[in-house]
Image (cartoon, helix red, strand yellow):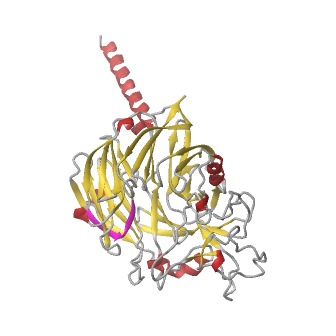
Amino acid sequence: MKKSLVILSLSFLFLLSNCDKNEAEFFVNEDAATFAEIGTIDIGDVGAAEISAYDPATNKLFVVNNGTVNKIDVIDFTDPAKMSVIASISMTPYGGAVNSVAVSNGKLAAAIESVDKQATGKVVVFNTTDYKEVKTITVGALPDMITYSPDGRFILTANEGEPNATYKNDPLGTISIISVNDNYSVSTLDFSSFSSQQASLTAKGFRIFGLNASFAQDIEPEYITVSDDSKTAWVTLQENNAIAKINLETKAITSILPLGFKDYNVDGNAVDISDRDNLVAANKWNIKGMYQPDAISVVENGGIPYLFTANEGDSREYTAFAEIKRVSALKLDATAFPDATFKTDAKAGRLNVTTTLGDTDGDGDFDQLYSLGARSFSVWNGNDGALVFDSKNELDTKVIAAGVYDDARSDDKSVEPEGIATGMVGNKKVAFVGMERVDAVAIYDISNPKAPVFLQLVKCGDAPEGVLFIPAKNSPTQKSLLVVSSENDGVVKVYQPKTL
């Protein structure tokens, strides 16, 4: 009798341990090349669907809505095919627009800029159940992106610190690290300690060029990703063409990784740079691109952190200072650009380039041309910033083949890759690249981070801003989900792959 009881108890414990193991190793055999739309919801017009965050505990989707009023819309996500807005959280008590949201352990964190964009911003934490305020924390100027560390111990914000129109008030670009378990205490870091490295960083493609701006003022943090062990973060410095690395244990910026430039005059990098040539034709050009990434996501493989970036590009355009001009308006060095027709509209004349780079010998003409962004996504070694992979002109090529290329953007940033997310779909590691100017998301198999393979292109709403991946283990459908929020039409779309 006792022996039977012992065997029964051991069997029960074995089942419990296996149950926990299966939960930890939740797996659905899915085909990552078969994402299809399963749900859509329209929550407004321009500015009404920017960034989304999902809470698996309550099956709620929280969506930034800066349409007619500044708020966060709460969507019932129990059935993604039948989404509905069930509540809204007003941002009026907290300041200006809400720029980003993130969720962890039943808490929603929102990054909110001040009405005066150059003043300090706020992070406000709410319960995801009743939307009551938990804490308000002061951070740097213009918090543009917010995220939790995977372990939920930290909330991080990239505080862009943009100048005002006259460039007379240019706050520091900063990163805030909020310790959740220490009553939300905050450390806000700036880049002043790196000013002595300006010359060596600039030689590698780093940019400091704002009007009368100091080194620390000129840096503009954009987007953050955090390692799986929550010990390291990487932050894109978009306008500066670099990535910063942060030690979260010591709360210190440890390095700035300049990204250099892309050469459009080599095989595989051919692009269409004219919106007035009456055709879509890729050619090689004596022109370089500044990577200038927006979104970033880390994927760890073989002990190496690989950083996936969406190389959107961005320029500074203010009343007191505007950096871009069309090639047709520039004086070009005759030796570097001997073709007399180079500046015509059908060739390079319409291309927007920066005027802050290119006069290498200081004689008043341009010896090299630098355009905005890289029309691609890239993979970088997170330890040293080395370029591991670039998609070259493949995004353009796939979009053209699908018949959705916008030739009117050829002279600027083309497809404009902006958002990126990564995650496991079935047995494949996958990247999702949102392209703002063609209203589509490219899906790649990144099982080998050094050689991503194109899988699929899905159409979405107008100007996708937020690209969110929900793993099957957290999904209300128990399948992987892709959620795309589009800021020009206020539409949120949900996609799901087929199972095998």
Residue 244 position in % (x across, y down): 50, 67
Q: Nearer the viewer, residue 354 or 273?
A: 273
Residue depicted at 68% across the width and 89% down the height: 363
Residue depicted at 24% across the width and 59% down the height: 135
Residue 205 position in % (x across, y down): 61, 73
Q: Looking at the rendering, which quadrant does residue 81 occupy?
A: top left
Q: Looking at the rendering, which quadrant does residue 159 occupy?
A: bottom left
Q: Nearer the viewer, residue 242 or 404?
A: 404
Q: Nearer the viewer, residue 5 or 300?
A: 300
* Main secondary structure found in the magenta portion: strand
Q: Is residue 54 left or right of residue 304?
A: left
Magenta range is 136-145
| Residue 192 shows in this picture | no
Q: How many marks?
A: 0
Q: Is residue 347 left or right of residue 191?
A: right
| The residue positioned farthest toward the top in the image shown | 1
- For the C terminus, the quadrant is top right
Residue depicted at 55% across the width and 59% down the height: 416
Q: Looking at the rendering, which quadrant does residue 375 occupy?
A: bottom right
Q: Is residue 495 left or right of residue 123?
A: right
Instruction: Look at the picture and state if 470 lies above or below 313.
Output: above
- For the N terminus, the quadrant is top left
| Residue 108 shows in this picture | yes
Q: Nearer the viewer, residue 347 or 60?
A: 347
Q: Is residue 374 left or right of residue 77?
A: right
Instruction: Look at the picture and state if 217 lies above or below 282.
Output: below
Instruction: Look at the picture and state if 354 lies above or below 376.
Output: below
Whether 214 is among the magenta residues is no
